[in-house]
Image (spheres, coloured by chain):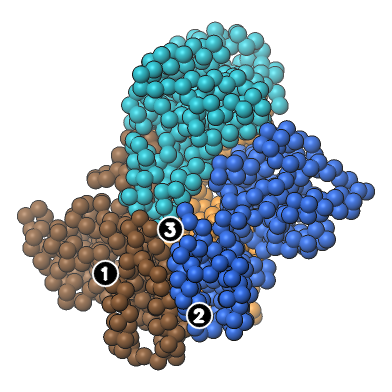
Chain colours: A brown, B cyan, C blue, D orange
């Protein structure tokens, strides 16, 4: 596999926008390996993800942005340029429950998740051994109502110290304040254990049981200051029945949470997600 | 296929309840072809569905209830006795959209839905020809804000005139008043075009589009005076993406609505649904 | 909705191929509303579907092909040009079972399937009334082992007489000879009632029951002279259990057959399917 | 949770069979918490799983079997009696791939799988560290064509030494000989990476890619001497597309394999699986 570059683009929809970028790449000998686009006709916005081979491309990595700038400026384009051999520095945050954390770490170790996992942070000590076994730095940052502000300052220091650019809340049971969310806008992925917008708030499996639903779900979304209201990246549901009590729903839900979070994190790491308003464009993997 | 009888039972959970009924049937030479039970340990309620062959059973149909009464009384049991060769008299209510109505009628005609469809009622004339083609009585009962009370009286007369015991709202876009719902308590099945409790109320597909969900759903439930709050019988979801506009969601949702309503109606017609509180027990088909 | 044109392209993969087409459209004032591409790196083939608005495009419909020919020639491109306001003339073939046929006709009548349904052909008279009700010409062409060749000649005459370009086998239980399949290569869509390549041949639901599978499926594919071996367009499965006998599998399978065939036919009608070898590229709807 | 006993029963179908068992339990003060039954009308076989509370039951654990023997004898019943607080001694066999093994171990450690995991066996040393971290005995038994018979003898010794009663092939890439399979008949669970009976044999993901299927699957089954032909316990599929190469299918398939194997193992551990012929009855969890 040769290394590739990814252009994640958005701009007002207009004639010639596809040709302008394709032409820029063709002029410099670029070989496009994937291209996907989307137009929101209501908002009049054009979105595109173009992935092209660096091998044979006539520009060096640091020349691409400046060379593309005139095109971007002419089309009022927002540009995000990424290289697929430079994985995103990532921190995983967890509380006591291990299923999402262990799954992400196992996938990462198996080479399945293109992340640069730099740290695990938890308000509990439970996963220190497993992280030590894997050689991943583990930061135990306990928190209480009184110490929340100080703990979040410590958290931000840890994240900054590791150069983290993506924060994954792998069943981290603390609500992050606006300070943290703002510092990592659209770079904090959370897993909520219901098919949002149903069962917002605490104990969604109990809520689901009380309502007598025949499906449970899980939702991965970017965290915002409005809890459970951020842009949705992925969702999944599974059938349940009257036989399932709250414990059964919780157990079945764990599999959904694990799967949906892994898919969403993977989409982000592969530079396939564009956020606009409270929605996402998620290009195919 | 020999005819069978179905006992739908519920009572306080207690030792010996399974044996009491099994023993009653064994004493009269009954051959059980299906039996399913459920205990809600929180509420302490026992539910059971037993289906047994009438061929070889020593009691006549009208003797079964009286003979079982002492057992039922001793166990404080609620008993519903049905015969599978006596289909439930059913009315289908629709507005302009044909997909659920045509699907149910087609399944019924193919022998797939064990109903006795006696009438189609609509506030529009659109389906009169198709019903005439099938030989099903069609009642066109237009309605406006001013005529709602009178229209519902006419509706109740039509239902009574046909001896209807099950009302299926096959995308009938009028809210039924408490008068109708009370007259057919737990015998009115509605299809709502979202995965309840998300997107209660009007225009759920627009709500879903605005929220940017990655799944849409449909929910079949018994109608109650609280709109969209009745006991859920069945639900299903399907993946959607940023590419889907409201029209796409509506089109994809139609397939969900059709499928989920047919499954729920089938479950009711096969005497597999027990309602308790705002929940249902739906035994397997 | 303004009318659009669709270019379905395939050619050897090469640098500049995206730019060449995008540039052609941009030079003539084309506004691209959808574009999707795929590269098969093993075979070295590039596939693309581009949909652009005719409104504002500087070329007339009959000028587009000739104007694009030099581009296509230079890139050794196979080109299929379609207009979305010109639906494909279609014939539906069925035997006794109604579910797929009625579903396709109902979707078409509801404006959901962009087809030009010109005829229904059956080896049984069963659906004549329903087609008369809809105003669709119905051709009853009975067939036996002795009359197969003559019946197929009559079938080809009917298809030709109606100018048919797409043949949908909506549970048509006769194997078409190579003569018919060749005349409509990659234009005959069949629904097979298993998840191919499992349970090739007759009675797949009985085969599935005998094997004790926990899933049944349905497969829509282009018909070829090798039965059940043609390029797959779409597939779906559903859970079953030990409780399901062959009749249950058949009933549950009908819903799968109906849904999968409708999706596949829709994809073809929207010019989203490209065949290569024994595979398909199906672009997103 | 009080401890419960499970009776897994099968016998010729006959009148009174439900009553006989229910009556036996009622006579000894048993409180049934779950009961499910199934009749195969073609084979004329009755299957039942009854779970009842030991607390309050008048017989000691070792008295139940003898006391029930007359009932079983009269009805020609095959009886399997289990206690849910006595987990099945289990060995996990794996090769290089970690996903199924790590998932099962993680679920077991989280209290989700009611197993008594006594050993992990592998023909590779890769998972020794992780098992040491968990405190699970790890047996590295390398194998080659020449040493297969000796390796299997060593394997049988390890299994016997640990008192193993269930062997889970968690992507163990060696074909077990009849000697091993016979010693653990219906007690070896394998995961095959296709929706059997499609793509039997080697490289199912490559076979799937070559055939151009739109779904991939995984199948958990009891191992028999006929490879990939044993009774199926569970299956699942997932959508794929032309965009997925063999590596993508393999990655997506891993999630299916992991999930399906975990579900099948859980069903076996909860005494919910009955084998007959080449099929299974899997009662609901």
What secondary structure is found at the residue carrying circle 3?
loop
Q: Which residue is mark 2?
A: C20
Image quadrant where residue D210 sits: bottom right
Mark 3, other Cα within 10 Å: few <14 / some 14–19 / many ≥20: some
On the same chain, marks 2 and 1? The answer is: no
Mark 2, other Cα within 10 Å: few <14 / some 14–19 / many ≥20: some
* Mark 3 chain: B
Q: Position of residue A130 (x, y in %)?
A: 30, 68
Determine whether B34 is above or below C90 in the image.
above
Q: Is residue C225 visible?
A: no
Instruction: Tell me the residue at 83%/44% (across/down).
Output: C141
Q: Is residue C247 left or right of residue B230?
A: right
Question: Is the C-beta separation of discs 2 and 1 under 8 Å?
Answer: no
Q: Which residue is mark 3?
A: B243
As rendered, which of B249 and D77 lies closer to the eye?
Answer: B249
Instruction: Tell me the residue at 32%/43% (across/down).
Output: A198
Tell me the number on the disc at residue A166.
1
Determine whether D263 is above or below B198 in the image.
below
Q: Position of residue B257 (x, y in %)?
A: 49, 39
CA separation in Å, label 3 and label 2: 25 Å
Image quadrant where residue B58 sits: top right
* Mark 2 chain: C
As rendered, which of D127 and D262 lies closer to the eye?
Answer: D262
- Count the labels in the image: 3
């Amino acid at each position: 596999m040769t290394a590739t570059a990814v252009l994640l683009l958005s701009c007002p929809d207009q004639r010639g926008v596809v040709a302008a970028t394709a032409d820029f790449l063709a002029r410099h000998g670029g070989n496009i390996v994937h291209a996907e686009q989307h137009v929101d006709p209501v908002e009049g916005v054009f979105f595109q993800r173009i992935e092209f081979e660096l091998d044979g491309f006539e520009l060096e990595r640091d020349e691409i942005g400046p060379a593309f700038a005139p095109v971007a400026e002419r089309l009022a384009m927002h540009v995000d340029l990424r290289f697929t051999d430079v994985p995103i520095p990532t921190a995983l945050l967890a509380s006591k429950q291990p299923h999402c954390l262990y799954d992400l770490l196992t996938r990462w170790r198996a080479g399945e998740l293109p992340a640069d996992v730099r740290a695990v942070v938890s308000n509990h000590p439970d996963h220190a051994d497993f992280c030590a076994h894997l050689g991943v730095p583990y930061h135990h940052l306990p928190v209480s109502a009184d110490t929340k502000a100080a703990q979040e300052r410590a958290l931000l220091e840890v994240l900054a110290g590791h150069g983290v650019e993506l924060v994954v809340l792998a069943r981290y049971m603390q609500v992050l304040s606006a300070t943290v969310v703002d510092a990592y806008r659209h770079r904090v992925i959370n897993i909520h254990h219901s098919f949002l917008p149903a069962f917002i708030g605490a104990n969604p499996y109990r809520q689901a049981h009380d309502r007598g639903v025949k499906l449970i779900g899980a939702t991965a979304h970017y965290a915002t200051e409005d809890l459970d209201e951020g842009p949705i990246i992925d969702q999944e549901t599974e059938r349940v029945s009257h036989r399932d009590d709250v414990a059964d729903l919780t157990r079945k839900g764990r599999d959904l949470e694990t799967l949906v979070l892994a898919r969403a994190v993977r989409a982000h790491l592969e530079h396939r997600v564009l956020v606009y308003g409270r929605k996402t464009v998620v290009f195919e993997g």
